[in-house]
Image: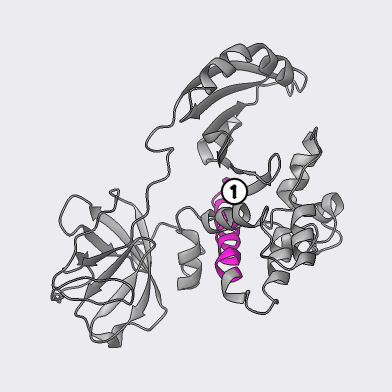
Amino acid sequence: MIDSGPKPLAPSSGVVKPGINLGNGPILPAITLIKGQIVEGVVLQLQPRLLVETANSIFSAAASSAVYTLGERLLFKVLDPDLHPPRLELLRFGKLPDSPLVQQSAFLRSLLYRPNSLAPLQKWVSNHLSSTTLPPVLATLLQDFWQLPSNPKAIDIQKALLMSGLFSESRNKSQSLASAMAGLAKSHNDLKAFLQLLALEDGLEMQVKPLLEALYSSQIKSLDALLNNQLYYQWLMPWFDHQHLLITLQQNQQQRRQKQWSISLAHQGPELGSLQINLLLTQGLQERETTASLHFASDSLWLAPLVTSSKYQLHTALQVHGIHLQQVSVGPITETEAKPKVTHTILDIHV
């Protein structure tokens, strides 16, 4: 059910989408929604019923097509996920979270509130690093780009961040710090530039479009955080052979006042399974008085004894950089850390 105005929307039934056999009646969603969650949808049909497709559902209703346009991006807020169907609110300008960017365009709003922004890029990178489906020259570019030195140093991590695609535009300004550290953004040393080159290949444009949008979304979220006196950077970093880490660096306004930073490293792979490392850094009055709290989470049994036996090495490694390891904990992956299963379903909506 969606609150979008005083006029009721009649429930629909028998909605048909190619490849989906719905039978004669509506199907309630087998999806998990959270109260307050922002859901993005794209208008994919106007007649005979309005259809809005989200990442894991299709909302349908009898509504006037004059209000909407094909391809328009709509945002919904989950008001009551326990109702059947769930109650959603169509978000308009006045009801969106305060941000200078949301007033600019529907596309920017879509990018800003898109959940799991880099998920399409993660999947693509995992599939293509060890495959032969790319043209040989492009495959070589990707292989050369997607690696770190065997013993990476802090400068290598900084360069990996700069080469993630988040800073492509600033790198192309020769006087910028990003350009000085990692050079101009080229297809061999910048993920966004590489994808833009890939999009020029015959037959790959549509495959690459969602990957570029994933980077655009991450860039917009970083910009929005800066405009609100916060930090938010999320990027993919090479890790071992043909693998990667999803890194999230955050600092809200309260953390900024307390000189704290939150860093999350997430990995999903056949050897290590699901792995999550959460790091909280706190800078003391003196520059060399930084403290760290570490939490490791995994769905595998190997992690706990490894962390327990490695606490001294962790302490020593951080101490070299003037960081005191204050706390280390380990546990299983929680529901909030685990990625929700995505199912594609049909949902009728009404006011």
* Count of marks overlaid on the render: 1
Residue 314 sits in quarter: top right
Q: Which residue is mark 1?
A: 234
Give the color scheme: rainbow, by chain, secondary structure or one colour: one colour
Q: Position of residue 295 (x, y in %)?
A: 52, 25
Identity of the amino acid at label 1? Gln
Query: Residue at left 76%, top 54%?
Result: 143
Query: Residue at left 70%, top 70%?
Result: 198
Q: Position of residue 244 (x, y in %)?
A: 64, 44
- In the picture provided, is 160 more to the left or to the right than 213? right
Residue 50 sits in quarter: bottom left
Q: Position of residue 202 (x, y in %)?
A: 67, 79
Query: Residue at left 75%, top 43%?
Result: 158
Q: Position of residue 131 (x, y in %)?
A: 66, 57
Furthest toward the front, the residue is 132
Front position in the image: 128 or 293: 128
On whether residue 290 falls in the magenta region, the answer is: no
Q: Main secondary structure of the magenta part?
A: helix
* Magenta-tinted stretch: 208-234
Query: Residue at left 76%, top 23%?
Result: 321
On whether residue 222 falls in the magenta region, the answer is: yes
Q: Quadrant of the C terminus?
A: bottom left
